[in-house]
Amino acid sequence: MPIHYELGDDHIVWITIDRPEHRNSLDMDHFAQLRGAWDRFNEEDDAWVAIVTGVGDAFCVGADLKTYIPQVTAMQRRMKSEQTDVIDGYRLDDGGKAVLRGVKIYKPIIAAVNGVCVAGGMEMLGGCDLRVAVPEATFAVMEPKRGLFAGGGTTVRLPRQIPFPHAMEFLLCADRIPAERAFHMGLLNEIVPTEELRDAVLRYAYRITANGPFAVRKTKESVLLGLATDMREAYKIESAI
């Protein structure tokens, strides 16, 4: 199974994309598996923090376009002809939910970026609360170079997460950005050697799990809901929470 889900006694879930032969790209089945992993994390009471990472030298490079585009196109046609939202257990929004677009997960998510993080991988990164990367990691919104639109949340989240000029450099130039520059742009919390990546993300996870889990979740909820509105409404949300 390319998507691994491991919940330990420490309340920390590891979600690992294990498709290194394709640089951890995802086709329709893998997107559905990844969505299922996030749904499981959200629902399990003992799961307090998730860490997402990849196997090999890539974190995630997004959709496996050679297989995913024909698959999703065929599925759209079947859904239209059969007038249904689900085909063989797959849904059209599996890709978006897999990269955390529009999901309501108020538990903390940490990205352990072990390598290349582009396209859908970059989109998923935007749904992660803390990000630690290795020096060799690179980051990019690659879609415009292929004449595509990055519809996994990056055009919405990135300008809210890092300074506007940096966000627009990512979105409009579509160039690969090395880890060191990404750190200085505000995209990352920390850069550590590859052999220290696991320990580094666990340190953040343990610092979080040392706190009250309900308080942590409601704090993230207040932040995300508040970012989606103006300050007056955000204060009302905060008071209600």
Image (cartoon, rainbow, N blue to C red):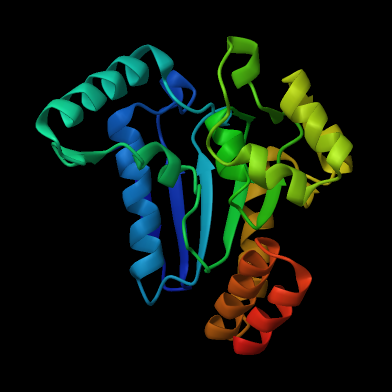
Residue furthest to the left in view is 82
108 over 84 or under it: above or below: below
Tally of numbered discs: 0
Q: Which of the two residues, 217 or 82, is positioned nearer the viewer here?
A: 82
Quarter of image, res 211: bottom right
Quadrant assignment for the C terminus: bottom right
Image-based side of 23 in relation to 228, left or right = left
142 over 165 or under it: above or below: above
193 over 160 or under it: above or below: above
Q: Residue at x 77, y 19 (%)?
A: 173
- Expressed as whole percent of the image width and height from the top left, the position of residue 223 reads 67, 69
Res. 2 in view: no
Q: Residue at x 21, y 41 (%)?
A: 85
Q: Residue at x 30, y 24 (%)?
A: 72
Image-based side of 122 in relation to 187, left or right = left
Res. 181 in view: yes
Image-based side of 45 in relation to 119, left or right = left
- Expressed as whole percent of the image width and height from the top left, the position of residue 56 reads 52, 29
Q: Which of the two residues, 234 or 2, is positioned nearer the viewer here?
A: 234
Q: Residue at x 29, y 19 (%)?
A: 73
Quadrant assignment for the N terminus: top left
Quarter of image, res 42: bottom left
Quarter of image, res 182: top right
- Expressed as whole percent of the image width and height from the top left, the position of residue 89 reads 17, 42
- Expressed as whole percent of the image width and height from the top left, the position of residue 195 reads 66, 42
Image-based side of 106 in relation to 46, left or right = right
Q: Which of the two residues, 33 or 137, is positioned nearer the viewer here?
A: 33
